[in-house]
Image: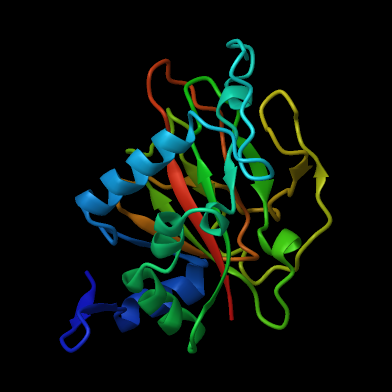
């Protein structure tokens, strides 16, 4: 459990949590967003889902069921055009945790929203800092569940203890199962494990940690998530 800072009502990580993050490369915190926050975020992006925002969200409203991600692509950088998205990118409990993990104030760098509708492909295993290129140090992700997340609807997979491995040049991903083209093979002896989450839970992880997701195998469940990246 999180302790609380009485003055600011901010979450304070325990020593065990800090050690787990250092050891495993990730940390799951329960209910960092309230049910009301989750509903606000969900409602915002349901509204965005019926629009087009050039350069950020460009769905194909005529798309069939052959590729659900054509109708529901990810929203890129919603904080750049929506104040509510920006507010939640800077959510005080998230920033407080990042401040402890970094040992200094975090800088918000990127926001995304994934709808991941039923039947949609996953994202092959990868490392975030291959793309964000934070140096020195690394980026940190705050991955917030908007829906219940499990293996059936394409929940997140992480490869523990890969946070200290170098950023590697990716191989080509299987386009039948991944909507992205890059794949990072886990080191020998290390395997991905699923992370089960409830709405409002946040998974923090290191930019070198290998992670990804499988296909959403359900017929009627989205796996919506609000994902932000930060730099030291």
Seen at 40% across and 53% down, the residue is: 144
Q: Position of residue 41 (x, y in %)?
A: 35, 47
On screen, 169 above or below 193?
below
194 or 68: nearer the viewer: 68
In which image quadrant can residue 5 be found?
bottom left
Q: Is residue 140 left or right of residue 84?
A: right
Position of the N terminus by quadrant: bottom left
On screen, 142 above or below 69?
below
Position of the C terminus by quadrant: bottom right
Seen at 73% across and 79% down, the residue is: 135
Give the number of callouts: 0
Residue 146 visible in the current orientation: no
Q: Position of residue 29 (x, y in %)?
A: 32, 62
Q: Is residue 38 left or right of residue 195?
A: left
Q: Position of residue 175 (x, y in %)?
A: 75, 28
Q: Is residue 139 left or right of residue 40?
A: right
On screen, 128 above or below 10?
above
In which image quadrant can residue 100 be found?
bottom left
Q: Is residue 76 left or right of residue 37?
A: right
Seen at 44% across and 45% down, the residue is: 225
Seen at 62% across and 14% down, the residue is: 63
Residue 45 visible in the current orientation: yes
On screen, 127 above or below 164?
above
């Amino acid at each position: 459990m999180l302790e609380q800072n009485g003055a600011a009502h901010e979450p304070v990580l325990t020593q065990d949590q800090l050690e787990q993050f250092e050891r495993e490369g990730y940390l799951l915190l329960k209910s960092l967003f309230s049910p009301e926050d989750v509903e606000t975020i969900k409602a915002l992006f349901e509204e965005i889902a019926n629009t087009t925002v050039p350069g950020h969200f460009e769905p194909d409203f005529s798309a069939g069921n052959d590729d659900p991600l054509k109708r529901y692509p990810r929203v890129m950088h919603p904080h750049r055009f929506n104040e509510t998205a920006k507010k939640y990118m800077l959510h005080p409990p998230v920033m407080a945790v990042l401040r402890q993990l970094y040992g200094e104030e975090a800088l918000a760098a990127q926001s995304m929203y994934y709808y991941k509708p039923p039947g949609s492909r996953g994202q092959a295993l990868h490392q975030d800092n291959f793309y964000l290129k934070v140096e020195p140090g690394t980026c940190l992700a705050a991955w917030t569940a908007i829906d219940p997340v499990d293996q059936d609807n394409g929940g997140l997979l992480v490869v523990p203890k890969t946070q200290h491995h170098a950023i590697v040049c990716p191989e080509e991903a299987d386009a039948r199962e991944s909507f992205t083209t890059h794949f990072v093979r886990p080191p020998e002896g290390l395997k991905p494990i699923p992370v089960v989450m409830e709405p409002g839970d946040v998974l923090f992880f290191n930019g070198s940690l290998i992670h990804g997701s499988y296909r959403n195998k359900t017929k009627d469940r989205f796996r919506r998530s609000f994902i932000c990246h930060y730099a030291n």
